[in-house]
Image: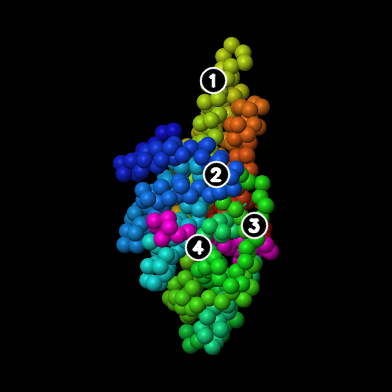
Amino acid sequence: MSTPVIETEEQQALRAAVAALGKRYGREYFTRVVAEGKHTDDLWAEAAKLGYLGVNLPEEYGGGGGGITELAIVLEELGAAGCPLLMLVVSPAICGTVIARFGTEEQKRQWLPGLADGSRKMAFGITEPDAGSNSHRITTTARRDPETGDWILNGRKVFISGVDIADATLIVGRTEAVSDKGARTGRLKPCLFIVPRDAPGFSRTPITMELAAPEKQFELVLDDVRLPADALVGGGTSHALDSGGEDTGLLQLFAGLNPERIMTAAFALGMARYALGRAVEYARDRQVWKVPVGAHQAIAHPLAQCHIDIELARLMMHKAAHLYDSGDDMGAGEAANMAKYAAGEAAVKTVDQAVHTLGGNGLTAEYGLASMITAARVARIAPVSREMILNFVSHQSLGLPKSY
Ligand SMILES: Cc1cc2nc3c(=O)[nH]c(=O)nc-3n(C[C@H](O)[C@H](O)[C@H](O)COP(=O)(O)OP(=O)(O)OC[C@H]3O[C@@H](n4cnc5c(N)ncnc54)[C@H](O)[C@@H]3O)c2cc1C
């Protein structure tokens, strides 16, 4: 797989070093961990020690001082080696970014060094059973206890990844905004809370997924979860949500979305590259007529198309990461959505084609490709579905009217 020319020497060196680490663990390690119901702790710890997990976080809080470009390189290369680390999307990319950009000084000091050195993880919970793709409809609410100033959270979340292995979950809720003079406005605004794993009233139930992955998905219930005032990202009061006359909670949420989409693209592309690699190897060797099966164009051309799709999606991912890292949040939005779309589609198509290339072996546990069919679909559905991206492009880029 070629290295994009737009990368700096440092980025190319990072890519090569992460690829070497991934190769040392490889798919066998990942498959074994999943089969044993364990987590990729060894790989996580070694990647952390080498400084790869917090490569995007600020240096003053123990991070590498790089951008989402670097973190995407880490995820893509580990995925291409057969070891995608889903928690990289959530912990340093979404939660780390939101806290680095909007957290109070205390929150930054409390969380960023641990997220950067991998000793702590944070999950991210926005999806709700009755809201789904329509996150305007979420009903998890936070109200203040007037006596103590504590926050009290109630609600439900679904499909939240890695809550069991995360020290806390960044929960997206809503609270009533108050005016500058402290009066109630009746208006609900989004707000983000850091909810510790073992907070009383915060319970989780694993969802049985047909996914071969070490990270589990959970349904969460928040039943009068009482949190101190400083659990609110960015400040202790809901006045903080009104500062600058802007919806600060909404800005915080948006700050996490571009990294989330860019990292999902990296996740999908790593997986697609891994599957393509296995298929090409097989197609070169397997011979049932006079030539290897890869010489038949019916097998070669779809693989070539997958390669093209992957490379095009990588270019868009680089564009999105570049725009994001240069501070252009708005410009990055369209590119990040398109990169996530293109990468998700490339992953679904490539894994399917890889399975087919191996014939019967495509469905054996020994080759381990069939289970990737479900894994590849994740990138089409989450964190925002293919259709919602097509909606975004229809409305935002093309100016077409909305159907909903
Ligand atoms: C493996 C996995 C891990 C996840 N991890 C997390 C996590 O860590 N944190 C978190 O918050 N969430 C997580 N999610 C949830 C994920 O973000 C949602 O599944 C996703 O946003 C889609 O929501 P939904 O499942 O409710 O589908 P729905 O919203 O019910 O959509 C169902 C179908 O209808 C389509 N649809 C919906 N609205 C429209 C429309 N207006 N126009 C056209 N089509 C439409 C969708 O594209 C989809 O195909 C995870 C999901 C999975 C599968």
> What kind of element bears circle 3?
strand
Residue, disc 4: 167
How many other residues sit within 10 Å of disc 1, few (<14), some (14-19) or many (≥20)? Answer: few
Q: Nearer the viewer, mark 2 or mark 1?
A: 2
Q: Amino acid at mark 3?
A: Pro
Q: CA distance from mark 2 to mark 3?
A: 18 Å
Nearest to the observer: residue 104 or residue 333 = 104
Q: Residue at 55% across / 68% down in the picture?
A: 198
Q: Residue at 45% across / 60% down in the picture?
A: 120
Q: CA distance from mark 4 to mark 2?
A: 21 Å
Q: Amino acid at mark 4?
A: Asp
Q: Are marks 1 and 4 in contact (CB under 8 Å)?
A: no
Q: Residue at 47% across / 61% down in the picture?
A: 95
Q: CA distance from mark 3 to mark 1?
A: 42 Å
Q: Magenta segment range? A: 114-136
Residue, disc 1: 285
Q: Amino acid at mark 2?
A: Val
How many other residues sit within 10 Å of disc 4, few (<14), some (14-19) or many (≥20)? Answer: some
Residue 112 lies in the magenta-colored region: no
Tell which circle, 4 or 2, labels the residue nearer the N-terminal end. 2
> What kind of element bears circle 2?
helix
Residue, disc 3: 206
Q: Give the left or right position of residue 251, taking residue 129 as reference.
A: left
> What kind of element bears circle 1?
helix
